[in-house]
Amino acid sequence: MPTLSVAEPAAAEPDQLRSQIDAALDHFSRFNDGCPAQLQEAIRYALLAPGKRLRPRLVLLAAEACGGSIAAALPAACAVEMIHAYSLVHDDLPAMDDDDLRRGRPTCHKVFGEATAILVGDALLARAFEVLAREIKSADRAAGCCSVLAQAAGATALVGGQAADLAGEAGETDIRGLESIHRRKTGSLIAASLQLGGLVTGATETQLAALEQYGCHLGLAFQITDDLLDVAGNQAAVGKRLAKDAARGKATYPQLLGIDASRERAGRLIDEACSAIGIFGSAGEPLRKLARSVLDRTR
Ligand code: GRG
């Protein structure tokens, strides 16, 4: 894997962050000759598709809040986006959520076939840890990042939440069951993103604990707004099929709490997320701004 060289931006403005993230994802998704051309094309189709890049932004902003640099945090930002992209590709498969639209485009298996889509997920999962292990310039910090991301992607978190969801564990009326699934399926990678940003920077225990709290509140709020978009969003803007949860009789926040109460709950969680990172002072403002933007999101 060639070394990534990045210019440090003057300030971490959202669009600058996005172009830095996309350039790094482009870099890390070029494989050498052992990777068949069609597999590489499919990996890049899934990874470079126009998602919001929420998780990598969180990594970078957490690193900055802790006094670190964007350049040092970019490999971790890419690693978490690779895990996220793999989970979307696998979630869209017929054996799981069976979707044909993702990020405004046909899903990976619709374009490249199911077998290739499974392999895309497998390759992204492996690449994420390769990038962390090779690119983080301290063996201890790299090991810490691998441990956090493996836990968040594993059987007690992302994969466990997905399994519980597929098994219909939440039932149709159980808010605690619903939150348990979302904390694992959605919240774990979001919380891990914050931890990664702190870990690459050598954050203190107090800073990591504040980021953990922020990540937990934000993760749940993000899922509530996802459920609200599923009910009342614009499909062209969201870029995926909507109203699927209701059609499948799945529990959602709007269905259990109503739309207004769901919005209020998301708002309270965002307030709590913003308070949790008070220790960072003005260095935490970009994270607070990002959290507030989740409440108004249209995609
Ligand atoms: C296959 C192990 C495995 C897990 C799948 C990603 C996932 C878990 C399921 C997709 C359905 C869903 C509602 C997941 C909750 C997380 C979520 C809201 C994903 C979409 O994240 P965004 O909105 O997507 O950040 P973009 O495309 O913008 O990156």
Image (tube, rainbow, N blue to C red):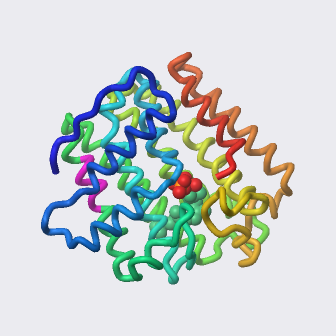
Q: Is residue 174 visible?
A: yes
Name the side, left or right, on which 203 lies relative to 252: left
Give the residue at the far left of this rendering: 33
Q: Position of residue 261 (x, y in %)?
A: 84, 49
Instruction: Give residue 284's quadrant in the image.
Output: top right
Give the residue at the far top of this rendering: 282
Q: Position of residue 42 (x, y in %)?
A: 35, 69
Q: Is residue 19 magenta?
A: no
- Which of 245 and 277 lies nearest the eye of the viewer? 245
Establish if 162 lies above or below 30: below
Name the side, left or right, on which 236 lies relative to 146: right
- Which of 58 and 196 lies nearest the eye of the viewer? 58
Tell me how many marks there are.
Answer: 0
Q: Position of residue 84 (x, y in %)?
A: 45, 57
Q: Position of residue 89 (x, y in %)?
A: 45, 69
Q: Is residue 160 visible?
A: no
Q: Is residue 129 magenta?
A: yes
Establish if 100 lies above or below 207: below
Instruction: Give residue 168's quadrant in the image.
Output: bottom right
Establish if 31 lies above or below 4: below
Residue drawn where x is 22% and y is 40% of the image: 4
Name the side, left or right, on which 250 lies relative to 142: right
Residue drawn where x is 55% and y is 27% of the image: 286
Residue drawn where x is 80% and y is 59% of the image: 254
Residue drawn where x is 40% and y is 50% of the image: 80
- Tell me the quadrant of ligand 1: bottom right
Residue numbers of the magenta segment: 126-132
Main SS, magenta region, reads: helix
